Image (tube, helix red, strand yellow):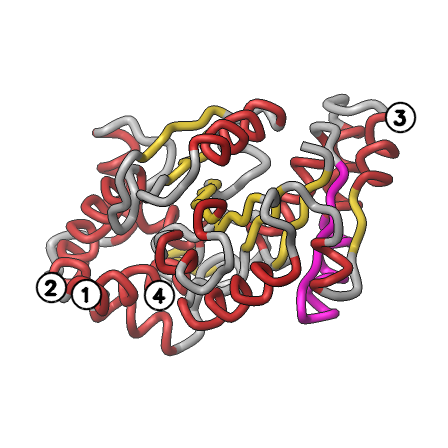
Amino acid sequence: MNKVAVVGAGSMGRQIALHCAIKGLDVSLFDLSGEVLSGAKEFSEHYLASRVEKNRLTAGERDAAAMRLRFASSVEDCVNDATVVIEAIIEEFQPKAALFDRLGKLCPPSTILATNSSNIVASRLADVTLAPERVINLHFFNPVLVMDLVEVVLHSRVSPEVERNALEFCREIGRTSIVVRKEVPGFVVNRIYRALTREAMNLLEGGFATAEDIDLAVTRGLGHPMGPFHLMDAAGVDVSYLARLDEYQQTGDELAKPNAILEKLYREGRWGKKTGYGFFDYAEPDDHGEHA
């Protein structure tokens, strides 16, 4: 892949862009918010500097990665000449559909148009583009700079060439990929994850155990590296809420309906580590967190 464009410079988008740059690809990153884009630039500079301090990158590798990462002034500027475009904006269908409609007109048919959505399937977005066979889910996991897996999610109109190129892209950036052959809300990882977090929230809401003890049970009893409540705080309470809400609206499945506690946190803007408060309180960005 000659050039990657990432639209959306929030937590996921900035990490995807930076990882691709570190792995040797030319990357353009854009966000409608100048403040968010500036934050992404500061994040990238800080991360690259910290990798040099920890002897994970040389100064030369840091400088080369920084040179490969460009912060674009518009969507048009960002996606110009891109071979892969990755959308990483808010987890709501209408804004994504509007963007894909625009991308379908801006990008040549050979460009892969990928959404990083954890829940919205690509076939819904493919309907608004001029070439639905090149629209696909490339679902990265947070934190992208650490997590190895990418879910490549296919729908019936994805061409074999796009599938091959998507898998090759994952190899180029040093990530393990799995192919989800049929679309299903939540794909593979999040379907398993939501079953776990749904039961965890039921236990919390019923007063059977505290969030701290439920997380401890999962980490010490099941051997997971992080408990469900700390994981939701890390991924973003807003992301969890909106993904569940979208699945519920699409399927009518009562099991997908957001839990009352999750909805309350979302409405209050307690979105986890990104806001300093979620299921736990975080005095500093990297704090483990005390129960809210």
Could you give the CA–CA distance between mark 2 and mark 1, rounded to whole angstroms?
5 Å
Q: Are marks 2 and 1 in contact (CB under 8 Å)?
A: yes
Q: Residue at x 21, y 70 (%)?
A: 260
Q: Residue at x 43, y 53 (%)?
A: 117
Tell me if residue 286 comes above or below residue 25 in the rendering.
Answer: below
Q: Name the image quarter holding residue 77.
A: bottom right
Residue 182: x and y, percent?
A: 26, 40
Left or right side of 6 for 163: left
- Nearest the camera: 10 or 174? 174
Instruction: Give the mark nearer the N terminus: 4 vs 3.
Output: 3
Tell me if residue 161 comes above or below residue 183 in the rendering.
Answer: above
Q: Are marks 4 and 1 in contact (CB under 8 Å)?
A: no
Disc tally is: 4
**Which amino acid type is shown beneath numbered disc 4?**
Leu
Looking at the rendering, in which quadrant would you find the N terminus? top right
Could you give the CA–CA distance between mark 3 and mark 2, rounded to whole angstroms?
53 Å
Residue 133: x and y, percent?
A: 44, 46
Could you give the CA–CA distance between mark 2 and mark 4, rounded to whole angstroms?
15 Å
Tell me if residue 291 comes above or below residue 109 in the rendering.
Answer: below
Instruction: Give the mark nearer the N terminus: 1 vs 3.
Output: 3
Which numbered dot is residue 257?
1
Q: Name the image quarter holding residue 102.
A: bottom right
Magenta stretch contains residue 33: yes
Image: magenta residue range: 26-43
**Which amino acid type is shown beneath numbered disc 2?**
Glu
Which numbered dot is residue 60?
3
Left or right side of 221 for 11: right
Circle 4 sits in a helix, a strand or a loop, which is it? helix
Crowdedness of circle 3 by 10 Å Cα count: few (<14), some, many (20+)? few
Instruction: Give the mark nearer the N terminus: 2 vs 4.
Output: 4
Could you give the CA–CA distance between mark 1 and mark 3, rounded to whole angstroms?
49 Å
